[in-house]
Structure formats: structure tokens, C-alpha cells
Image: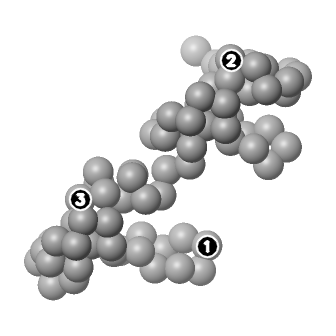
Amino acid sequence: MARCEVCGNDYGMSFEVHAHGAVHVFDCFSCAIHRMAPVCEHCRVQIIGQGVEADGHWYCGAHCARSEGKAGIVDHV
């Protein structure tokens, strides 16, 4: 068993996420999202889906990127 780094639950089915040279332990996807998901630099929502990256900055979508002055960003449908 391992303890979730977000909620502290000691859970037999916890899992590890390896990212950027670090190992993170979570008991559920909700905790993993809470800790690992990037945050939109315009509206501050956690980016659960694709999101867009422009010049090293993360946004939840093209609208927020354009609102921050990023050009040429479009959402795909």
C-alpha cells in the first residue's frame, strides 16, 4: 500500500505517475488531476483535455490564448 500525496489515503490500489524525473503516488484519478493538470494562464481552470500551448504558456483553449495576445491559435473540431 502507498499513501496518496494529495489526500493522504493509504490505499492498496494506489498508482504511480512518472513525470519530469519525479514519481507521484495517487489513490485516484481525481487526486492525480488535482496535482498534475496544468492551469490555464488566462481563466485559471485546470486543463483536463487537450489544451493549447503557446510560447511555453498553457491555455484551456484558443479563446483564452487569443485573449492573452497569442496569434494563430485555433481550436480543432
Q: Amino acid at mark 2?
A: His
Closer to the eye: label 2 or 1: 2
Q: Amino acid at mark 3?
A: Cys
Q: CA distance from mark 2 to mark 3?
A: 31 Å
* Residue at the image point whose x is 59% and y is 28% from the top: 43
As drawn, 52 above or below 12: above
How far across and down, in percent of the image, does residue 48 sit? 46, 40
- So how many labels did they put on this image? 3
Tag 2 residue: 63
Tag 3 residue: 28
How far across and down, in percent of the image, does residue 41 sit? 67, 38
As drawn, 42 above or below 75: below
Decide: few, some or many residues near mark 1? Use Cα within 10 Å; few <14, some 14-19, many ≥20.
few
Label 1 residue SS: loop
How far across and down, in percent of the image, does residue 61 sit? 63, 25
- 65 displayed left or right of 25: right
- Say whether residue 51 is visible: no
- 9 displayed left or right of 74: left
